[in-house]
Amino acid sequence: MINIDEIFDYTSYNIDREPHIILDNTKCVTCEERWCVNVCPAHCYAWTEEDQKMSFAHDGCLECGSCYILCKPGAFTRWRYPRGGYGVAYRMS
Amino acid sequence: MKRSFEAIVVGAGPAGSAAALEMAKAGVDVALLERGNFPGEKNMFGGMLHKMPSLEEHFPEYWNQAPLERHVSKKATIFMTNDAHVNVCMDWEDFDKPPYNGYTVFRPRWDSWLADEAVKAGATLINRCTVEDLILKNGKVVGVKTLRDNGEIYAPVVVSCEGVLSFLADKMKMRKKFNPAKMAVGCKCLIDMPKQMIDDRFGLVRDQGVAYEYVGVSMGVRGGVALYTNRDSVSVNMVCHIGSLGKSGITLYDMMNNYLEQPQMAKLLNGGKLAEYSAHAIPEGGYEMIPQLNADGFLICGDAAAFCNATGINLEGINMATHSGILAGKAVIAAKKNNDYSKGGLDLYRKLIEDSYVYKDLKTFKRAPGLLHDDRIFQKYPDFALDMIKQIYQITGEPKRNMTMLVLNHIFNNGKVSLMDLMSTVWTAWRAL
């Protein structure tokens, strides 16, 4: 069983303070689908209905690329891999 | 740090290290750039290593020297619902003898091993080196910009082995726009279990391993599970098409938990402990997704070129990536000899690819991705088939129907799957496979 809120207990990261993905969340307000919320396997995206706001945290990003594939053009002002040596660090996958 | 080389390979995965190995062995001064702290640190897969003849040219009997987990002697396709499963299991003595049919591996170890071999042959491996862009001169690729200070590195040819997102091919306008319906995302739970427990539960001895594929466990989403045994862990991989997953509103990890809690799976994995969680996108578009492969000073290999065959019967990727890397290496060697790194000078790569099983298989199975867009396979058929099989094997004390009547009765009275449904799927499958 996996509890995604405890991802840092299972997977190692060397987190860069400089984010490798910058989301323009004004685009998310008009997005009809917001599928990123359930597609992201690390649960990095969360939509708050009251505030009508998408929040994104790059810390737990597994660098899988599904949001890059899924989201509308212009949703990201930056989408690149982390600087060398930073980000997710698999030991045996 | 040295700034110019005869060739640059972006990404030290199976394609990149194979390309660098091929080139270095022929005396090409090649830089192999890797964004992780070491090759394989960023890589995961939900698959196995199939037989790789092109690698055997460099390492005859590589199974004696490479860091492998188990050889796969047993394969199964399993139809599963929330309370039942039917297992079509294939167990051959031949697959238990060298040359083996395939292996399970850990990517951080396997990818490191292959990169080390490229280094031993003379390649320059540069870790912690993320490539951000290409450097172009008069429309020709002449180097790369990296995310390091003064991070330009120059060479007359750049081989992109950067993986599925294929940023550099996009910058060259060589790849097609991604279609979320034709791309997949997989997550993996690596579950620690003692070797003896794995051997007993899966019916294995020595280094024997299994590769099991499950259909019907993806909560109606287009996808499935692939399970592999390592020496003392089990990899469980849940893979779904991104578009279908998005629409469903379900998450991969909830789907994974649903599968792990299925009573038959819970028994099989009882006592296991989650050791690592990982995920990655997969280019499942097949033949239609293959980009233009060569440009002036530029080649594309592996996942970046969509060389991935996920027909649902075998799941191939690393073997195709490795093969394409070796062919790119051969083309660069020839280009060096002729001192012609233009698109035409590198066209040997395209020819070699089109002549190889990589391209031919993707072409033969070009309709397979379409077959996997038949939602009935994931939503209705597993329930339907398992219900019918249950009736066949159940003795109730009521008089039995003969087999034909039972099947026909099931088709006409189950209320879920119609004869038209079945005929349409059989027709699509016939054309696809």
Image (spheres, rainbow, N blue to C red):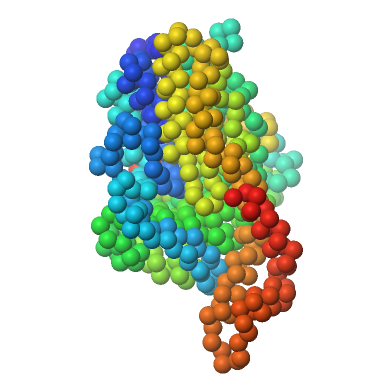
Question: How far across and down, in percent of the image, does residue B386 sit?
Answer: 57, 71
Q: Is residue A67 left or right of residue B13?
A: right
Q: Is residue B134 above or below residue B207?
A: above
Residue drawn at the location 41% of the way across and 47% of the way down:
B48
In this picture, residue B89 sits left or right of residue B374: left
Confirm whether residue B11 shows in the render: no
Q: Position of residue A75 (x, y in %)?
A: 66, 34
Q: Position of residue B235 (x, y in %)?
A: 40, 53
What residue is at 63 percent from the left and 36 percent from the top?
A: B288
- Relative depth, front residue between B311 and B298: B311
Where, quadrant-wise, is the N terminus of chain B in this rendering?
top left
Answer with left or right where residue B366 lies relative to residue A4. Answer: right
Residue B380 placed where, x, y %? 65, 65
User: Taking B31 as reference, is B300 left or right?
Assistant: right
Q: Nearer the viewer, residue B346 or B149?
A: B346
Residue B226 vs B63, above or below: the answer is below
Residue sitting at 57 percent across and 62 percent down?
B216
In this view, the residue in front, B195 or B355, is: B355
Question: Which of the 4 image quarters holds residue A91?
Answer: top left
How many marks overall? 0
Residue B52 in sight from this viewpoint: yes
Task: Residue at 44% x, 26% y: name it.
Answer: B327
Choose top left, top right, bottom left or bottom right for residue B330: top left
